[in-house]
Amino acid sequence: MNNFQAFSEAQELFPGGVNSPVRAFKSVGAAPPFIDRGEGGYIYDVEGKRYIDFVQSWGPLIAGHAHPKVIRAVSEAAKKGLSFGAPTLLETALAKKILEFYPFLEKLRFVSTGTEAVMTALRLARGVTGRDDILKFKGCYHGHSDCLLVEAGSGAATFGAPSSPGVPSDFAKHTLLCDYNDLAGAEAVFAKNGGKIACVVIEPIAGNMGFVPADREFLKGLRNLCDQHGSLLIFDEVMSGFRAGKMGACGIYAEITPDIVTFGKVIGGGMPAAALGGGAALMDALSPAGKIYQAGTLSGNPIAMAAGLATLEIIGSQADFYDILTARAETLMNGFAEAARSAGVALQTDFCGSMFGFFFTDKKARNFQDALASDTARFAKFHNEMLKRGVYLAPSQFETGFISIATTDDMIAETILAAKEAFKAVK
Ligand code: HOZ
């Protein structure tokens, strides 16, 4: 079966032919290759074509595809049974490993998806503060729970519906909005609603409006506002956790300590696992220690815990793990910048740890408006040109690229060569 036949059949079965919108490649005007397998830094489609993969399942596969240690850990766990709905030692082991990386956290709750992690973090913040309002930033995406699908990035931005139909206005009215990196805006919202805001939720390194890191002073300002007004600060590190660096954004902005951190992606190593973490007293407000309810049949699933644990062990076993990833991301983005310059194409590039992003524009993107103003038609053409040349980039301007430890220097060099031709083609 070829990619065209596979997508035609899937379109009969799934809305838009996919089970998560951005996978449909609609915003780059192409049909998605159907993936058969992955190995290290490569994926292969059902036609046998090989791609250098910079999507990596949207972030989790920092060790690369089918890393032997991860596969072994998953196989061993699977032999013992797939799910028990009861406590296992694997949960304890993964929790301890996460806390080694994030020592300021004391307790965690495992869930299955990033959506659930942030949804639970909000309920926790609302439960302990007794307040209903939350403050989020335009272009940040925190999963698809109702009150967070307001001016959201990622697939919601890609398909032009940052605020989705089906979200009751009664829910959305508790979501206050500000521009990313706009401290004065956040101060104004707090001045008006301070006593009602349960929490501020933010991607400290935004990856869902394209790659847009927060200004340090902006995050410091948010911390101060939360302290002044008795609100909690939630860092959504579902994407940036274990990606931006060893302690994710919390390590990059080390002087700013959030009250709650949410995780997903890397902590599941390619299996469905996510978590929220915070101080012990705060986390103990969750049921059954406290009254704030949250539950899940597959929470802490042993196979997912095994995959996550093996992945974090791979990271921990190599002292220069993030130095290698950062150097490769830097080489890649410098290569793109240089290639675009010689082709006469306006391009802004950025990276942090294993995350990278680029916008077709001459103005650095600092918020959602800037990201939306970039040339998405040119992005689409560039994406097509790269795909033709065997480079698999996220099929949307409003996503982030990822380097894995299996993305070799040769793959980076090959990608830069492809980009040189692609920038000329989109000029
Ligand atoms: N929301 C994910 C990217 N930020 C996409 C998930 C997927 O399509 O697999």
Image (cartoon, grey):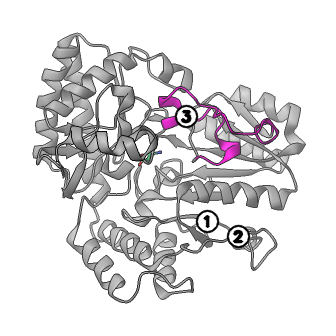
Q: Residue at x 53, y 59 (%)?
A: 113
Q: Position of residue 421 (x, y in %)?
A: 13, 22
Amino acid tagged 1: Gly
Q: Name the side, left or right, on which 101 lies relative to 235.
A: left
Which mark is drawn over residue 283?
Answer: 2
Please give the residue where the numbered disc 1 appears in the rendered image.
Answer: 277
Alpha carbons under labels 1 and 3: distance apart: 24 Å
Bounds of the magenta segment:
144-173
Alpha carbons under labels 2 and 1: distance apart: 7 Å
Q: Position of residue 417 (x, y in %)?
A: 11, 30
Does the rendering let one see residue 347? no
Among the 4 quarters of the image, the one containing residue 78: bottom left
Amino acid tagged 3: Asp
Q: Residue at x 57, y 32 (%)?
A: 139
Q: Position of residue 37 (x, y in %)?
A: 20, 57
Q: Residue at x 76, y 79 (%)?
A: 289
